[in-house]
Image (spheres, rainbow, N blue to C red):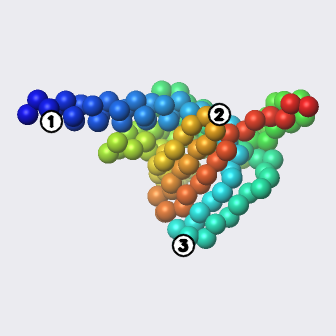
Amino acid sequence: MKKIIYLVLAVVLISCTSNEKKIKALEGYWNIDEVILPNGSEREFPFSNHMDHFKIDGFKGVKNRVSPTYDGSFVSYGNPIYFQWEEKDGDLSLTFQEGDGAYTQTVEKATKEILVLLHENGTRYTYKSYTPNEE
């Protein structure tokens, strides 16, 4: 019985640690790289001057659409999209509130380089971390 309890605790701790790393990695600037629709069709984005910026504060956050400027700053466009994050069944879920509607995305992967979000409608978004050109 003790072994089962230790196993369950280990799984919970690993899951929590993994999700904490994901939420920390989520914060920053992300260029969309690929979108896979629920029907399996793909849409690639070879170059985009627009990106999503995620900012986390506790269990809440905001996503803004931004574009870099020549001086290294960013210009925000559109309305910010606020969200809350939580752990559901070991997964990291982001619930966005946009206008009168809400939707959920699951963070499948979040590292310093890659972000993969699965929308509740089955669309999978793959992002690459934004790195400014050093010219």
**Is 33 above or below relative to 60?**
below
Q: What residue sits right under mark 1 in the picture?
A: 4
Q: Is residue 111 left or right of residue 32?
A: left
Q: Is residue 41 left or right of residue 76?
A: left
Please name the residue shown 50% across and 35% down the image.
22
For mark 2, give the secondary structure.
Answer: strand
**Type of amino acid at the residue the image marks with label 3:** Asn
- Mark 1 or mark 2, earlier in chain: 1
Q: Are marks 1 and 3 in contact (CB under 8 Å)?
A: no
Please name the residue shown 77% across and 56% down the image.
46
**Type of amino acid at the residue the image marks with label 2:** Gly
Residue 69 sits in quarter: top right
Camera-side residue: 70 or 82?
Answer: 70
- Mark 2 or mark 3, earlier in chain: 2
Q: What residue sits right under mark 3 in the picture?
A: 39
Q: Position of residue 33 (x, y in %)?
A: 69, 52
Specify whether residue 13 is in view: yes
Q: Is residue 101 left or right of residue 80?
A: left
Camera-side residue: 77 or 114?
Answer: 114
Q: CA distance from mark 1 to mark 2?
A: 39 Å
Q: Position of residue 112 (x, y in %)?
A: 61, 34
- Mark 1 or mark 3, earlier in chain: 1
Q: Is residue 5 left or right of residue 94?
A: left
Q: Are marks 1 and 2 in contact (CB under 8 Å)?
A: no
Q: What residue sits right under mark 2 in the picture?
A: 28
